[in-house]
Structures are given as C-alpha cells and as structure tokens.
Image (cartoon, coloured by chain):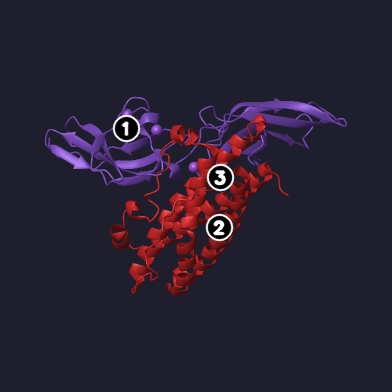
Chain colours: A red, B purple
Amino acid sequence: TVSTSDLLDRVSEHSDMIHSLSTILSQDLDSQLPPVGRMLLPRPSMCHTSSLQTPMDKEQALQISKSDLLSLARSLLHAWADPLLFLSTSAMTLPQLAQSSVSNKIQELKQHSQTLGDGLNILSDRMGQAAQAISSLPYSGGNDLGQDKISKLINLHFLLSCFRRDSHKIDSFLKVLRCRMANMVPEMC
Amino acid sequence: TTHSLPGKPTLIRCRSPEKETFTCWWEPGSDGGLPTTYALYYRKENSDTVYECPDYQTAGENSCFFNKNNTSIWVNYNITVVATNELGSTFSDSVDVDVVYIVKPNPPEKLRVVIMEDNGYPFLRVSWEPPHKADTRSGWITLIYEIRVKLEGRNDWEVHLAGQQKMFNIFSLRSGGTYLVQVRCKPDHGFWSEWSSPSQVQVPEYF
Ligand code: NA
Ligand code: NA
Ligand code: NA
C-alpha cells in the first residue's frame, strides 16, 4: 500500500495538472471569443458550485481542519463529474477551430479528475468519518451548449472559467493538506 | 493655453507576490494642462459596494496596495482608475482581477555560491532561500527554481531547472574563470520572478 504522504504527493500532482490544463483551455477559448461574447458571459456567482462556502484567504484556509480541507476538495471535484462528462461529449459539436484545441484537453481533464477522485477516496477512507462528508452541488446547466457558434463558445468558456477557479481551490486545499500532514518533516514544504 | 479633461488613464498591471496581498499600477493619460488627481475604485464580485483604494502610499507613484485585510482570493475585483481635474473626470477601462491569477513572487534570497571539490575538480554549490514573503512552509504557495550561470564577459547563460530544491551543483567549470550566478522562482500557478541580483565567484586554476 502507498504511504499517506506519497498519496498526497500524487494527488497534488494531479490537481496541479488539472488546474494548469484548465488555465490553458480558458486561455485558448478566450482568444476565440469575440468581444461581444465576453460581455455576455454569465457572472461567476452563476457557477453551480458558488454556494459552497470556502475560505477567502490564507488566514481562513489555514484554520480549516485537515478533514474539512479534504471534504471541500472532494465536494468540488465531485460537483464537476457530470459537467466534465457533458463537456467531453459536447466538445465534439464545437466549431472546427475550437474543437481541435479543446477536445483532447477535456479528455485529459476527465482522466486526471478520475484518477484524482480515486486517490482522494483512499485518503478520506484513511482519515476517518469527518473526511468523508461531501456537499451536494448538483449541476443543472442542462446538456446542450447551445445552437449557434457564439452561444456554444460563451457557455463553454463560462463552464471552464468556473472549473478553472474550482480546480485552483482543490489544488490549494490539497497542497495545504499535504504540508500539514508532513509537518513532522520540516523540509518537505 | 488650452485646458481640457484629463486623458484616459490605463491600468497596466496587477500583481501579488505571495497570494496574500496585491498591488495595481496605472499610467496617467495625456495631461489636460491642469492639476490632476487620480483615484482607484474597486467592486468585488457579488457586491454592489464600491470602495476606494485603501493605500496609495506603500507601492509608490500611480499605484494602489491592498494589504492582507483588503485581499481576498477566488473572487473578482473590478477595478477602475479615475483621473480628475477642475474640468471633470476621465475613467480608465475597468479590469477584472482574481488574485490567484496574478501571482509573481519576489526573487529568491540569500543566494550563496561556494566552490567545492570532487576528485580534484572544482564545482559550484549554489544555494538560496525562498523570498521571505512567500509562505512555502504551510503549502500556501509552492515554488520551483531556475538557476543561470555564465562566464564573466560572455553573453550566453547556461540555464538549469532545480525543481523545488533550494540547492544545485554546477560542474564542468573553466579553470580560473569568473562565474556569475542568478536564481529565480515560479509559483505553482503564476509568473516567474525577476532574477536575483548576481553572485560572483572565481574558480581556482586547476589541471
Ligand atoms: Na500610489
Ligand atoms: Na485577506
Ligand atoms: Na497561485
């Protein structure tokens, strides 16, 4: 069996990769979105995960217990399982230019998220009852990106900008958790 | 002389050195020929309240510094600069900023280069510390490092990626050569720092 500190190293490699990929994807799409599309983007409060209470700065983040850090990361990741599946099927219907650059990266995101989820499940089993709580954040955005090219790009861009923020949260919580669990080895972090 | 409204100011950059505070800088527009004052206003996502810059002093001219109490992450700040003279005001384009996407650390500190020896051949042992503002110990920020080395008087740097290590050995030195060494760092998600100021070391003559 993998040691808990190795497991934390591995999961934070995946969360790091997921956030980096989502950043590249957002930037790809940003360059394809015409100015009028940018003005029509929904506000971040419309993200389906925005109701989850998360820390707003370092001071708050460092006060959260280890099991709550893991629980927040798992809740966010879990909330993206359905929309990522939806994204991976609907990326095929994008206009040509967007499709080639987006499709492969979304598949990669899906795979890393799956692996990350498996790792976090093992961790939460090891950390006991409190770490297993998950907040339900259902995605009700439907499973159609829209009819015309601009709508599709806007909806995709919006979803990815929500995911980009959430994946940064997941990555940050896991890296703080990793250092907290390693506090016996001061040079780890 | 003709007087006019102030020219349009431009928000040129916002940066956070450690994901805990941030600063924005602007460039004044053309001069309207009258005394002009500048103010920065911001509104946070999910709120209609408009605030004025909390600190125009700390980061120097044409800047606004947000300390820890005024800095939240994972929330957009909508920022606008307003230039005002006695004829009226001109607004900059507004910019949306989430602090997590503008992290650029200060350069690493306490760069040390010492000459060591391996089987009669010298090598450089380069070591450094993270910028003191970056809280790497709690995991709040994770830094990787890059070192560059060149012979004094030459133009070509040799670049090495050190990963998260704070120490790096450089081999294959020129006998009697004087080397310049610099180090920089990059957060897990963000921009490379500037290079540290160089450290210089002379390799002894050897054969
Ligand atoms: Na200032
Ligand atoms: Na703060
Ligand atoms: Na960051």
Looking at this view, is B153 or A163 the one in front?
A163
Percent x, y for residue A13? 61, 49
Q: Residues within 10 Å of mark 1 (few under 14, many from 20)?
A: some
Instruction: Give how far apart the Cα atoms at labels 2 and 1 are.
Output: 43 Å
Query: With respect to residue B196, does A173 lie above or below?
Result: below
- Mark linked to residue A113: 2
Looking at this view, is A129 or B103 the one in front?
A129
Query: Is there a contact, CB below 8 Å, between mark 1 and mark 3?
Result: no
Please name the amino acid that badge 1 sits on.
Answer: Asn
Pointer 1: what residue?
B62
Looking at this view, is B200 or A31 the one in front?
A31
Q: Residues within 10 Å of mark 3 (few under 14, many from 20)?
A: few
Please identify, in this view, whether the residue under mark 2 or under mark 3 is nearer the observer.
Answer: 3
Percent x, y for residue A100? 50, 70
Query: With respect to residue A167, does B113 lie above or below?
Result: above
Q: Residues within 10 Å of mark 2 (few under 14, many from 20)?
A: many
Which residue is located at x 49 percent, y 36 percent?
A64
Instruction: Pick whichever of labels 2 and 3 is earlier in the sequence.
Output: 2
Q: Is residue A89 left or right of residue B84?
A: right
Please name the amino acid that badge 3 sits on.
Answer: Gln
Instruction: Give how far apart the Cα atoms at labels 2 and 3 are.
Output: 23 Å
Query: Is there a contact, CB below 8 Å, between mark 2 and mark 3?
Result: no
Q: Secondary structure at mark 2?
A: helix
Q: Is mark 1 within 8 Å of ligand 1?
A: yes
